[in-house]
Image (cartoon, grey):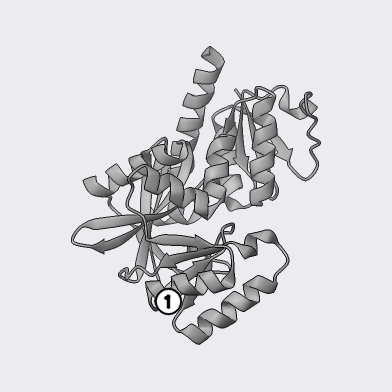
Amino acid sequence: MNIGVLYSRIRRDEKLLLNELRERGHEVTKLDVRKLRFDLSEPPAALSACDLVVDRCLATSRSVYATRFIDSYGVPVVNTPETAAVCADKAENSLALAGAGVPTPRTEVAFTKETALEIIESFGYPCVLKPVVGSWGRLMAKIDSKSAAEAILEHKATLGHYEHKVFYVQEFVEKPDRDIRVVAVDGEPIAAMVRSSEHWLTNAAKGAHTSEFELDGTARDLVARASDAVGGGLLGIDLMETGSGSYTVHEVNHTVEFKALDEATSIDVPARVVDWLEAVATQEVVA
């Protein structure tokens, strides 16, 4: 098969994926999104031979628009533009999870700093203010006091981009200094790890310690439901433990990184990802 890999930079994640595809004898078309031109009707020539394209774009905007164009050309792409659009925006993400009955932290959105402050005061301290678009824990703030809330809201209100005028406020979940990252394909977990840190942010990108995690039945059920809620695909699903064997799903990621998981677990994560890509591509060819 010819698998297109849409990228903006070749990181270790993409190298693992490319190596696995080539070792299995697949032809790989590297698609540098920075150099592609997207016509309204005619696809870029490099796309014409692809049986399937896998989106590995770093930038959210590129991912959302590029997958939409690729889909319009009739070229199968994972993840789909519908899934990308839901996962790329935290408010859309939260709405999808809540709409599907998936436990997720209490969240409210406001469009002025005055109303946002009312939400924060009603939540109590600490609480969390997040950008609606972003990853790797950037621009997230744990707010511990009213004075801190006023300062951060004022700062966001002066920033130019409209996304900073959407104030996404979430309750602070008292997790046990760790969260759980699950990489799943169409709701079926490939592997999971805990990301532990003394800092309230437990992203691997922020230096959290990672180790393998064995999912129980409750967590597996939530992974499947969260995947369905956003449209399925190759996803990173983040859970937090809330005590007594229960969890809350705080985010689903559509261009998930897996190098840290591959190092933390005994499972060959790139191989399992390619297993799924082969199955999807085969279904598309038969269809």
Residue 175 visible in this rendered orientation of the protein? yes
Q: Which quadrant: the N terminus? A: top right
> For this view, does 99 lie left or right of residue 207?
left
Q: Answer with the quarter of the image where residue 178 lies.
A: bottom left
Residue 79 visible in this rendered orientation of the protein? no
Of 251 and 287, which appears nearest the observer? 251
> For this view, does 142 lie left or right of residue 75?
left
Of 218 and 182, which appears nearest the observer? 218
Disc 1, SS: helix
Q: What residue sits 76% from the left and 26% below the top?
A: 43
In this rendering, is residue 62 above or below 278? below
Q: Position of residue 16 (x, y in %)?
A: 56, 45
Q: Residue furthest top?
A: 286
Query: How many residues crowd around disc 1 within 10 Å: few (fewer than 14), some, or many (20 or more)?
Result: some
In this rendering, is residue 40 above or below 10? above
Q: What residue sits 42% from the left and 35% below the top?
A: 186
Q: Residue furthest bottom?
A: 147
Q: Position of residue 45 (x, y in %)?
A: 79, 26
Number of disc labels: 1
Tell me the kind of residue under disc 1: Glu
Q: What residue sits 55% from the left and 73% below the top?
A: 114
Of 121 and 8, which appears nearest the observer? 121
Q: Which residue is mark 1?
A: 121
Q: What residue sits 38% from the left and 38% below the top?
A: 187
Q: Position of residue 127 (x, y in %)?
A: 42, 73
In this rendering, is residue 155 above or below 40? below
In this rendering, is residue 215 above or below 202? above
> For this view, does 99 lie left or right of residue 49?
left
Q: Position of residue 110 (x, y in %)?
A: 53, 63
Q: Residue furthest left?
A: 244
